[in-house]
Image (cartoon, grey):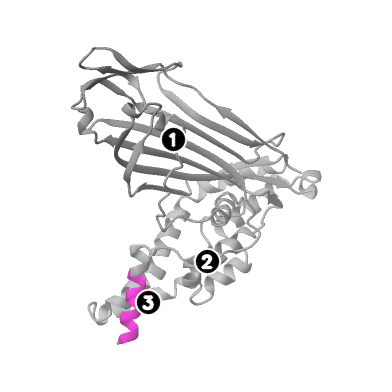
């Protein structure tokens, strides 16, 4: 059974705040913050799976990058003098306001994407599917000749499902030798030992929070402020997967000729499997907008005998919270304090089953649906 441990992280930057009575000149209250470093590291933590290599972990670190400096003379009879000082409101990490952006996939979808992108048997050009799509071209040319405006909706669909995929496949074929060489190198390595393969970025987003009014409390009421807060969260997901050769492949490595044949089949998709059939089924593309069935079937393709473990989904977020103080009695209207919180997380996720979801449609997808609706209304 896995055992998790949590370690706390605390650090402070030196800073001070002094409240002086204007009438007497006496110090009413002094707050001295001690620490080291050029920034304030507020309370953070690291939680990980003890003794597990590449296991799950979460790390949180707060960073206060814009302190209060200067002297402010208030109408309440006090002078407030600050040097690199932060309200105690910022001495601990505030949970980020993860505003839903609608398009963020769940970790199971991301795990399926990682396997799809790192699968050594993945095709660059799926030749059987491409040949089936070529039959759309003659009809497309004829319809354009009959009248572009009348058949613009039909032309859009035929472009999306005929010409556009063909152009993409031609680009892949022109790059065949490079893809073939890379696949050969990969296969030679895979038949001797496991390999970790990293996917590119899976999802990125920047989301503005709704903000609101807050009270920044401190140890003394004369250093407690009210103001408005603005937040922004930047998110980034990526992942990796370990591919392990079977015992049979390790015990009986294939010759260069055999590997070349496998690499050629993989790059060109020269196989008839469930993924090929799915791509040729009418309307399967629409199902794939709302599920990852097609991706799941692609993940099952095994031209070379290697198998993935549970993908690691990595997440990084930077949450910025800017407090604008509104304290006219203190003479501090418009003074800002900023906190930046950094989050890192890694989790291992199974992609054993396909999943369904309700995404926000892209402009291209809306255009395709509009063309379908136009054809239906004729």
Residue at the extreme front of the image, as rendered: 24
Q: Nearer the viewer, mark 2 or mark 1?
A: 1
Q: Residue at x 41, y 39 (%)?
A: 319
Q: Position of residue 278 (x, y in %)?
A: 57, 71
Residue 291, numbered circle: 2
Residue 333 in view: no
**Which quarter shows the C terminus?**
bottom left
Looking at the rendered structure, the secondary structure element under dot 2 is loop
Q: Which residue is mark 3?
A: 138
Crowd class of label 2 (few under 14; some 14 to 19; many from 20; radius 10 Å):
some
Q: Could you tell me how far apart the alpha carbons at marks 3 and 2 are, in whole angstroms?
A: 32 Å
Q: Could you tell me how far apart the alpha carbons at marks 1 and 3 are, in whole angstroms?
A: 57 Å
In which quadrant of the rendered view does residue 65 lie?
A: top left
Q: Earlier in the sequence, mark 2 or mark 1?
A: 2
Looking at the rendered structure, the secondary structure element under dot 1 is strand
Q: Which residue is mark 1?
A: 341
Q: Nearer the viewer, mark 1 or mark 3?
A: 1
Q: Would residue 11 be counted in the magenta stretch?
A: no
Q: Nearer the viewer, mark 3 or mark 2?
A: 2
- Left or right of 204 on screen, residue 248: right
Q: Residue at x 35, y 29 (%)?
A: 221
What's drawn in magenta, residue-wise?
367-377
In which quadrant of the rendered view does residue 166 lie?
A: bottom left
Q: Could you tell me how far apart the alpha carbons at marks 2 and 1 are, in whole angstroms?
A: 33 Å
- Left or right of 83 on screen, residue 127: right
Residue at the extreme left of the image, as rendered: 75
Tell which of 256 and 89 is nearer to you.
Answer: 89
Residue 48 in view: yes
Q: Position of residue 129 (x, y in %)?
A: 52, 68
Against 314, is 334 above or below?
Answer: above
């Amino acid at each position: 059974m896995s055992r998790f441990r949590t370690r706390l992280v605390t650090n402070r930057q030196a800073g001070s705040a002094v409240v002086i009575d204007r009438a007497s000149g006496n110090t009413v209250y002094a707050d001295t913050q001690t620490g080291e470093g050029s920034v304030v590291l507020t309370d953070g933590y690291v939680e990980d799976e003890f003794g597990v290599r590449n296991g799950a972990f979460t790390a949180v670190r707060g960073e206060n990058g814009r302190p209060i400096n200067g002297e402010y003379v208030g109408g309440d009879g006090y002078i407030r003098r600050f040097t690199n000082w932060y309200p105690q409101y910022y001495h601990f990490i505030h949970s980020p306001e993860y505003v839903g952006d609608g398009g963020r996939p769940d970790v199971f979808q991301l795990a399926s994407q990682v396997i799809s992108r790192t699968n050594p048997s993945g095709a660059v050009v799926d030749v059987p599917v491409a040949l089936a799509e070529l039959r759309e071209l003659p009809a497309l040319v004829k319809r354009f000749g009959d009248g572009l405006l009348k058949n613009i909706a039909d032309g859009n669909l035929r472009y999306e499902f005929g010409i556009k995929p063909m152009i993409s496949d031609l680009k892949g074929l022109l790059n065949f030798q490079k893809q073939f060489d890379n696949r050969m190198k990969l296969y030679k390595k895979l038949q001797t030992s496991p390999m970790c393969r990293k996917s590119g970025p899976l999802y990125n987003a920047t989301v503005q929070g709704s903000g609101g009014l807050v009270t920044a409390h401190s140890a003394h009421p004369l250093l407690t402020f009210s103001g408005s807060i603005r937040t922004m969260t930047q998110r980034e997901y990526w992942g990796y997967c370990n591919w392990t050769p079977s015992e049979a492949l390790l015990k009986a490595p294939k010759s260069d000729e055999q590997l070349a044949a496998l690499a050629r089949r993989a790059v060109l998709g020269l196989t008839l499997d469930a993924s090929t059939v799915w791509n040729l089924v009418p309307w399967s593309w629409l199902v794939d907008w709302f599920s990852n069935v097609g991706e799941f079937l692609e993940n099952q393709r095994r031209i070379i005998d290697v198998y993935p473990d549970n993908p690691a989904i990595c997440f990084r977020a930077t949450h910025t919270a800017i407090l604008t103080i509104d304290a006219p009695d203190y003479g501090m209207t418009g003074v800002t304090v900023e906190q930046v919180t950094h989050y890192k997380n890694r989790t291992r996720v199974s992609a054993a089953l396909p999943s369904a979801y309700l995404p926000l449609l892209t402009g291209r997808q809306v255009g395709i649906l509009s063309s379908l609706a136009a054809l239906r209304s004729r």
